[in-house]
Amino acid sequence: MAEGSEGMVRTRSWTVLFLVLMTGAGCTPMDDLLVSIFGRSMRDQPSIGAYEDPRLPPEGAVSFASGNFPGAPGEVAVGQPEGTAIPAPITPLMLLQGHPDAVDIENPIPADEASLERGEELYLRACAPCHGDAGAGGGPVTAAGVASFTLIEGQALEHSDGYLYSIIRVGRGSMPAYGHQITHYDRWHVVNYVRQLQGNLPQQQEEPSDDTGEEG
């Protein structure tokens, strides 16, 4: 019994020592073991840093999300055909170069009351912290030294709807991408609201009047 007890004590001592060594060294020994077996570990794998553009998918590739692309605002597609064309992958460089896939996208959302209401909600949530409630810049985060640009004068007035949509989607310069936060149709709602701030909404055509000024 004495020898058995000594063996158990010795085993426990080695176990405690092993655990202490493992705790002190973190996961390095386990990683080294995996490297010796598989030739690689979790420490050595590609990753995407903040604001870093991922590589474009191979030509002709179809994204996993393509089958769930909605046909209209407020809809969720589950297995049915997409109702609109899936926007092509773009990068901030394509935006700066004026690539048609980035700047010539047609706005599919009319700037009606519902769109402007939704656009205002999203703008105040995601855009106003930098661009200000009225779009003139000087939002609250600029107090921390974050750059801010006006949306209601200068070059911003010359950008196409597609350009504004794409800059929301992939970002540009000091502006980060919001494509993961603001969905496809919601980006267009924001574009419409920005146009309202600019005073640049399409003029609504007045319905022709039946009144000819003549008495019957």
Image (cartoon, rainbow, N blue to C red):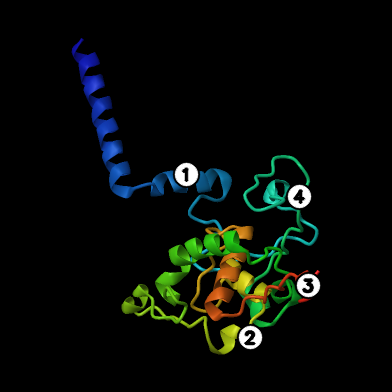
Determine the residue located farthest toward the top in the rendered image. Answer: 1
Task: Tell me the residue at 57%/45% (across/down).
Answer: 38
Residue 115 position, x and y percent, is 59, 61
In this figure, which residue is indicated by the disc labeled 2?
158
Q: Quadrant of the N terminus?
A: top left
In this figure, which residue is indicated by the disc labeled 1?
33
In this figure, which residue is indicated by the disc labeled 4?
82
Q: Which mark is residue 215?
A: 3
Determine contact: label 1, label 3, CB under 8 Å: no
Q: Secondary structure at mark 4?
A: loop
Residue 187 position, x and y percent, is 59, 64
Residue 177 is left or right of residue 144, and the answer is right
Q: Relative to 64, is 149 above or below?
A: below
2 or 4: mark nearer the eye: 2
Residue 119 position, x and y percent, is 54, 64
For residue 170, say whether it is visible. no
For residue 173, say whether it is visible. yes
Q: Which numbered disc, 2 or 3, marks the residue that appears first in the sequence?
A: 2
Disc 2 from disc 3: Cα separation: 48 Å
Q: Relative to 5, is 20 above or below?
A: below
Disc 4 from disc 3: Cα separation: 53 Å
4 or 3: mark nearer the eye: 3
User: Around disc 4, counting alpha carbons within 10 Å, would you say few (fewer than 14), some (14 to 19), or many (20 or more)?
Assistant: some
Q: Amino acid at mark 3?
A: Glu
